[in-house]
């Protein structure tokens, strides 16, 4: 079994750590990003036809701030959909391709009035393609550990985690949560050896187990 570096924020790493340890892997927790919520002004969804969520973090902070009548909700990938359901929000559309491009391709046309609720600095493909309004929910802060982590594999669940890990200058094989993270990691010179087939906890665990 492998020694696996888990880079998720401290408050979110538990389920992945437990699943990997149950399979016999040794886990090294090394948070490389923190989620910094933006000021919590209410988000009034009245008058929108759709709200789009792109991450479990986004689902949490959107639900905390939303007011007004909730329109149909679209999710990029099963992990975001799962986080929405945990808050009593059933997505009307879950992209089979867990990228903004995938969701745009499946979106009904004309899209109507769309609100894109996501991280500060998110890619603008969906905003431009659907003419969506954008509200930032949180910012991602890169964290540098006191000492470089030691492991056989590192799990990266976002492009931000890839950027943070690349700054450490370590040659550790990467298991990525999906194509956007893989693309970012490879652009930064990291070695991606496995990518989750489904971009959620189950997919990550299976990818680590196959690579390790």
Image (cartoon, grey):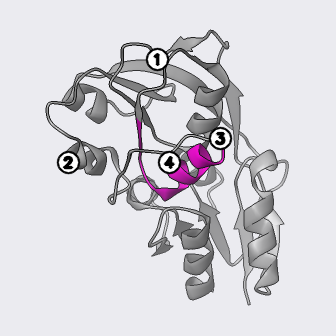
Q: Farthest residue toward the right?
A: 146
Q: CA distance from mark 4 to mark 2?
A: 22 Å
Residue pictured at 63% horizontal, 74% vertical: 205
Disc on the earlier residue, 3 or 1 = 1
Residue pictured at 44% horizontal, 54% vertical: 77
The one nearer the camera, 135 or 185, is 135
Residue marked by disc 3:
87
Q: CA distance from mark 2 to mark 3?
A: 26 Å
Q: Farthest residue toward the top?
A: 41
Q: CA distance from mark 3 to mark 4?
A: 25 Å
State which mark lies toward you, 3 or 4: 3
Query: Could you tell me residue 27's position as x and y percent?
Result: 80, 72
On screen, residue 43 versus residue 109, left or right, reads: right
The part of the chain drawn in magenta is 73-87
Q: Is residue 209 magenta?
A: no
Disc on the earlier residue, 3 or 4 = 3
The one nearer the camera, 68 or 143, is 68
State which mark lies toward you, 2 or 3: 3
Residue marked by disc 2:
105
Q: Is residue 139 visible?
A: no
Q: CA distance from mark 3 to mark 1?
A: 16 Å
Residue marked by disc 4:
159
């Amino acid at each position: 079994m492998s020694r696996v570096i888990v880079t998720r924020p401290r408050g979110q790493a538990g389920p992945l750590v437990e699943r990997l340890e149950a399979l016999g892997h040794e886990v090294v927790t090394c948070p490389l990003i923190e989620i910094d919520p933006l000021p919590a002004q209410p988000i009034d969804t009245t008058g929108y036809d759709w709200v789009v969520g792109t991450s479990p973090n986004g689902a949490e902070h959107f639900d905390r701030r939303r007011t007004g009548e909730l329109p149909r909700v679209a999710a990029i990938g099963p992990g975001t959909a799962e986080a929405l359901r945990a808050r009593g929000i059933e997505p009307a559309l879950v992209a089979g391709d867990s990228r903004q491009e995938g969701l745009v391709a499946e979106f009904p046309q004309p899209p109507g009035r769309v609100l894109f609720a996501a991280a500060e600095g998110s890619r603008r493909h969906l905003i431009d393609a659907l003419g969506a309004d954008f509200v930032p929910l949180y910012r991602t802060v890169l964290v540098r550990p006191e000492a470089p982590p030691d492991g056989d594999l590192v799990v990266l669940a976002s492009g931000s985690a890839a950027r943070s890990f690349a700054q450490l200058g370590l040659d550790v094989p990467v298991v990525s949560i999906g194509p956007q993270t893989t693309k970012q990691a490879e652009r930064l010179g990291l070695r991606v050896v496995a990518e989750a087939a489904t971009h959620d906890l189950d997919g990550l665990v299976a990818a680590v187990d196959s690579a390790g």
